[in-house]
Amino acid sequence: QMRSKGYDIPVIFITAYGSFDSAVEALRLGAYDYITKPFEPETVIHTIQHALEHKKLTEENIYLKEELQRKSGFEELIGDAGCMKKVYALIEKVAQSKVPVLLRGESGTGKELVARAIHKRSGRKDKNFVVINCGALPETLLESEIFGHEKGAFTGADKKKLGIFEVGNEGTIFLDEIGDLSLSVQMKLLRFLQSEEFIRVGGIAPIKVDVRIISATNKNLEKLIEEKKFRDDLYYRINTVSINIPPLRDRKDDIPLLIDHFLKKYSKEDNVPLKKVSTEVFRIICEYPWRGNVRELENLIRAVLVLSKENIIKIEDLPPVIRRINSHDASSQEHNDISLSSSGSEQKETFSFKQIREKAEKEYLIYILRQAQGNITRASKLAGLSRRHFYDKLQQYGIEPRKLRIGNF
């Protein structure tokens, strides 16, 4: 009865019946210990002292466990910059509620990591965290992934499939790139957010679930609303709280921390010796614009860690597009790329702005593909382009992704 009313105090059971059965029953009901009559006063004092010490240790263990869980939510979010501290503060504020959160930021800034941090610090942390990229699948498949489908719902549906809402019931659903949803799927998602019920594709019975929705986008949803490409009522549903994830160029003070983190992480994961970066490489990395943000930096560190031959990562270990941030390399390369000898004469050939831009674009695309180990989807994210736009660029320059694996870096 005391436990049920919230009294968390040690209980010592005193009985005149010293049978084994009564002792077991007392302990089963939650007593710390039991004392049989007759007893000495010293026995009671010692038992009480032990009970209080046990309670203190229990409280300390609970505190340490909660503190560990609290800190573990940020293990992959590296950074002490002021703009990141604002992100951490917002994570703390929204984690325990069910309020819908919209994460906004460029590709590669770590929106999924923020979503996971919110989940890990919530009451749903022991339930599923389910991720779906809304821009990675065609509409028909995406609808099936989200809502599930019944057997025979369409050609190839030879068995029932649970959607992410059922798989993630009582947990958290992360809708990445929500700005890529078609209007028809937007409508069905809105209906679910209003009722917390949905119907599988090909089904008739509504299914009710309890999930927390976190969405993310690198697009201007307000502009999409003006263009009639995104529903304003859905926007208001998912945008109860908005968290802006800063690009890496706005938190360059965090680059040293990120370099150190990725070196240690991939030294362990890829089973290679831990290495350091030279002073010059460090300067170049800090000055590079990082259009692909943290993800691009992470891929670079992993690649040079694996491929560099010495314990110190040097300038020659970097890809050309990053090396050129070095003023000497830049001026030298500019001379080689822009002014070329023609027919062995001293006359230099001058290239148009379009030619120079195309050359730079092609080299950048090749570099990004190598960073992504030839994976078009990952490379397009690094570049901050849609997969279709990125693929069209590859076609334009005749670049074959399969030839650009990490081994050919």
Image: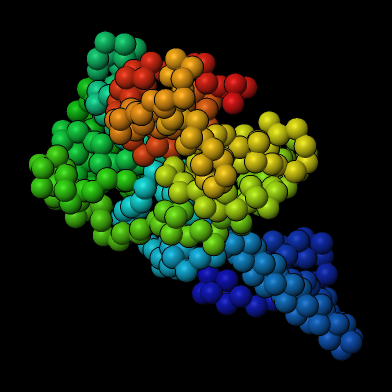
Is residue 387 left or right of 273 when viewed as pictured? left
| Displayed quadrant of residue 41 | bottom right
Quadrant of the image occupied by residue 376: top left
- At x 19%, y 55%, the residue is 236
Residue 400 location, x and y as percent?
A: 44, 16
- Please tell me which residue lies in front, 395 or 74: 395
In this rendering, the count of numbered labels is 0
Horizontal side, residue 287 vs residue 301: left or right: left
Point out residue 392 in the picture as x, y percentages from the top left corner. 30, 22
Colouring mode (rainbow / by chain / secondary structure / one colour) = rainbow
Q: Would you place residue 184 above or below residue 391 in this image? A: below
Residue nearest the observer in this picture, 289 or 135: 289
Q: Residue at x 65, y 41 (%)?
A: 315
Residue 316 appears left or right of 24: left
Q: Is residue 100 visible in this depiction of the protein?
A: yes
Residue 147 x %, y %: 29, 32
Classify residue 313 by image quadrant.
top right
Give the residue drawn at x 33%, y 24%: 393
Can residue 135 be seen in the rendering of this structure? no
Quarter of the image where the C terminus is located: top right
Quarter of the picture containing the N terminus is: bottom right
- 195 horizontally vs 33: left or right: left
Pick out the residue farthest to the front. Answer: 346
Q: Position of residue 300 (x, y in %)?
A: 57, 39
Residue under the point 79% across and 82% down: 48
Closer-to-camera residue (363/110): 363
